[in-house]
């Protein structure tokens, strides 16, 4: 048992207390909500006990009371203690006000943390009775029966002498419509109400009728829901949608008597479902949306989800249907640790680390290139929307004599592209093409005809025909396709002798040495 000292308030004005109460009613759920448990009355004090169940008990609590329509702090003895997962909060109001006949005192508590932040207040406990009488109710309690439907009502009387019998009244409202449920002997101290519906909250008030019949003593109002041992109907997960680092579930509740739903999930490796949520209260709508994003789930695993409903009697249903989802990968993928580039037969060969072997989320690679001396912007070498699914690439468009840098980026299954890439640089040797050979020139009626043979050389872009006369410089007469093997020079003048030779130009723009010279006279 743990005893705590009553905290000092900064100001004890009615306004402060009422403000504190309002704060407690509207703040977020910091603690397990406290509920009224029982009360006892003596001429010297009023004893009231509350309880809360769960893993978030209050660090301390403030006891408040409505007194003549004002909210005042109860400065009596108080303490709290824990039994299993239930925390009890107790107060002894040693300076209680006089309870007038037919009058009820209203007690409630506001839990708060070590920083003075208040949680949700308890419901109001109604305490009544005339302590000037020889008999009064010193203790009252209503609890669910354990094994079947029903509510067990228990009480204590300070003195049964002069008491003829005890009337038990019941209502589904706390402040009206009380109907006589049963009358029992003055020696009885408990009554089980079995005429109940599962999970419905019932309010009870006791009346001790005197032997003379002219005076009766009423207890405070106590309440409880009837216990429902039957498990509720399981929920149904209508849909699950992957999002970055998690999933969003839409859960349908078909049992209107449930208190809420709990979500279960495995770890994506072992098919064991574990609880991943508190009880999500059922709202007016029967559809509950649950966001599982706080734990940043891996987009490289597939997770299994299921759910259970819980009744107001704290009975869980069986599991719902199971759904499966792979979250959207939230971080860009890694780049290859190594990449190599080298020239082979006038082409650039690229090889890099197979990132897919260590990351199952990788689906392909992007290749881009930049030429030294250009604008330093990498340009993709792949058609739009195409990925490489292998860790090698051959660039047949590279030109001899150029220096290129290649960048390899990774792409994951969700389309995320690595922020940077692995880069390798290669310098291609200057490739001097081979000129055509066996050039032959002879005069015909229309001009001078030239014929030649092509060299076996890949990458010829054009064949260049030059002409000159004795004492003059050669000039380019015509640029011909790479597969040309003859040409008719119709511009040659009759009576003049001309000299001809050929060169080849490759795709990089490099021109070969001249071929042999051939001469002809028109």
Image: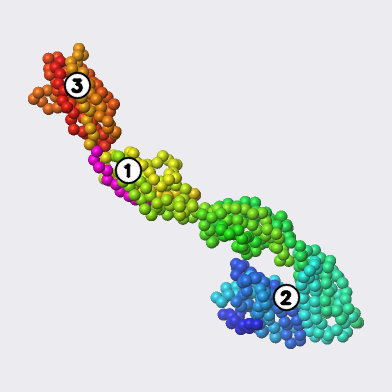
- Residue at 31% of width from left, 42% of height from top? 344
Q: Which residue is mark 1?
A: 348
Q: Which of these two is toward me, 274 or 9?
A: 274
Direction right: furthest residue: 212
Question: Is residue 43 in view from this perspective?
Answer: yes
Query: Contact (CB < 8 A) between labels 2 and 3?
Result: no
Q: Residues within 10 Å of mark 1 (few under 14, many from 20)?
A: many
- Residue at 47% of width from left, 54% of height from top? 359
**Looking at the picture, does residue 244 appear above or below residue 98?**
above
- In the image, the segment drawn in magenta is 421-431
**Looking at the picture, does residue 312 appear above or below residue 130?**
above
Q: Which mark is residue 369?
A: none
Q: Disc 2 or 3, which lies upstream in sequence?
A: 2
Q: Is residue 119 left or right of residue 137?
A: left
Whether the magenta-drawn stretch holds residue 174 is answered as no
- Residue at 60% of width from left, 58% of height from top? 271
Q: Is residue 103 left or right of residue 443?
A: right
Q: Which of these two is toward me, 98 or 252?
A: 252
Q: Which residue is mark 3?
A: 440
Q: Is residue 118 left or right of residue 345?
A: right
Question: Is residue 265 in view from this perspective?
Answer: no
Query: Contact (CB < 8 A) between labels 1 and 2?
Result: no
Looking at the rendered image, the quarter that the C terminus falls into is top left
Q: Which of these two is toward me, 486 or 308?
A: 486
Question: How far is mark 2 from mark 3, CA to CA?
Answer: 118 Å
């Amino acid at each position: 048992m743990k005893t705590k000292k009553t905290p000092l308030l900064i100001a004890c004005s009615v306004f402060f207390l009422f403000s504190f109460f309002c704060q407690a009613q509207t703040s977020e759920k910091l603690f397990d909500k406290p509920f009224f448990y029982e009360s006892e009355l003596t001429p010297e004090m009023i004893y009231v006990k509350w309880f809360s169940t769960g893993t978030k008990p209050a660090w301390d609590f403030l006891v408040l009371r409505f007194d003549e329509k004002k909210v005042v702090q109860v400065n009596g003895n108080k303490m709290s203690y824990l039994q299993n997962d239930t925390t009890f909060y107790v107060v002894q109001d040693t300076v209680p006000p006089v309870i007038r006949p037919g009058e009820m005192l209203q007690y409630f508590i506001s839990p708060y943390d070590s920083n003075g932040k208040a949680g949700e207040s308890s419901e109001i406990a109604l305490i009544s009775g005339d302590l000037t009488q020889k008999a009064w109710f010193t203790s009252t309690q209503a609890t669910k029966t354990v094994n079947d439907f029903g509510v067990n009502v228990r009480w204590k009387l300070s003195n049964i002498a002069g008491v003829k019998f005890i009337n038990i009244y019941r209502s589904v409202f706390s402040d009206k419509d009380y109907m006589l449920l049963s009358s029992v002997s003055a020696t009885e101290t408990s009554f089980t109400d079995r005429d109940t519906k599962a999970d419905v909250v019932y309010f009870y008030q006791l009346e001790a009728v005197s032997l003379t019949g002219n005076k009766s003593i009423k207890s405070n109002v106590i309440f409880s829901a009837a216990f429902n041992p039957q498990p509720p109907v399981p929920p149904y997960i209508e849909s699950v949608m992957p999002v970055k680092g998690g999933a969003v579930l839409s859960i349908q509740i078909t049992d209107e008597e449930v208190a809420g739903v709990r979500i279960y999930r495995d770890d994506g490796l072992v098919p064991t479902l574990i609880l991943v949520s508190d009880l999500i209260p059922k709202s007016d709508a029967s559809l509950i949306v649950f966001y599982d994003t706080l734990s940043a789930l891996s987009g490289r695993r597939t997770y299994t989800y299921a759910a259970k409903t819980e009744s107001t009697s704290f009975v869980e249903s069986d599991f719902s249907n199971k759904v499966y989802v792979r979250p959207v990968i939230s971080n860009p993928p890694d780049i290859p640790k190594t990449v190599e580039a080298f020239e082979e037969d006038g082409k650039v060969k690229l090889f890099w680390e197979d990132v897919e072997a260590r990351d199952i989320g990788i689906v392909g690679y992007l290749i881009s290139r930049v030429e030294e001396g250009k604008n330093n912007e990498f340009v993709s070498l792949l058609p739009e929307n195409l990925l490489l699914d292998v860790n090698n690439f051959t660039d047949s468009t590279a030109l001899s004599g150029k220096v290129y840098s290649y960048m390899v980026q990774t792409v994951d299954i969700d389309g995320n592209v690595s922020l940077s890439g692995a880069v390798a640089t290669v310098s291609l040797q200057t490739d001097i093409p081979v000129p055509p050979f066996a050039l032959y020139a002879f005069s015909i009626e229309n001009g001078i005809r030239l014929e030649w043979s092509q060299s076996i050389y890949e990458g010829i872009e054009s064949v260049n025909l030059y002409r000159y006369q004795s004492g003059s410089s050669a000039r380019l007469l015509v640029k011909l396709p790479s597969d040309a093997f003859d040409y008719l020079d119709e511009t040659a003048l009759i009576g003049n002798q001309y000299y001809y030779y050929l060169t080849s130009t490759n795709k990089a723009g490099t021109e070969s040495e001249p071929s042999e010279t051939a001469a002809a006279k028109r």
